[in-house]
Image (cartoon, rainbow, N blue to C red):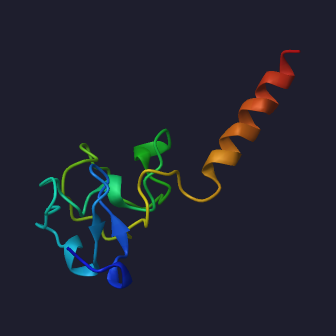
Amino acid sequence: MPTISETIGHCWHCGAALGSADYGRETSCLACGRPTRCCRNCRHYARGRPNDCVEPLAEPVADKARANFCEHFDPIPDPGTPAAGTGTQTADLRAAAEDLFK
């Protein structure tokens, strides 16, 4: 397990701290055994977007929890939280849609 100073992200499944060496193509989380280089651990992962990804040039990936070869992979520090701005943007869009029907 990485020390706190070298932690760059966390496992999407169990939340264990991950260092840069923990994001290899065939590397799994030491705590739970789930793949770490997968869409669920990437900052571009955005459920509901086309291909569940904000990167428009990314190749489609069928299983977001399996390891893949995506060249756009960039670890997200805390995969349990939405990407920056997506939560408030979604709330704003929902409020605007509800205002249309008042």
Q: Quadrant of the C terminus?
A: top right
The reply, left or right, for residue 25 in relation to residue 94 is left
The reply, left or right, for residue 52 in relation to residue 65 is right
Q: Quadrant of the N terminus?
A: bottom left
Residue at the image position 69 percent from the left and 47 percent from the top: 88
Residue at the image position 50 percent from the left and 43 percent from the top: 49
Residue at the image position 47 percent from the left and 60 percent from the top: 55
Q: Position of residue 75 (x, y in %)?
A: 37, 68
Quarter assignment of residue 29: bottom left
Q: Position of residue 45 (x, y in %)?
A: 43, 53
Residue at the image position 27 percent from the left and 49 percent from the top: 13
Q: Position of residue 11 (x, y in %)?
A: 29, 58
The one of 14 and 71 positioned closer to us in this rendering: 14
The one of 4 and 78 positioned closer to us in this rendering: 4
Give the answer, above or below, for where 82 lies relative to 72.
above
Q: Is there any visible trace of residue 37 in the rendered image?
A: yes
Q: Residue furthest front?
A: 4
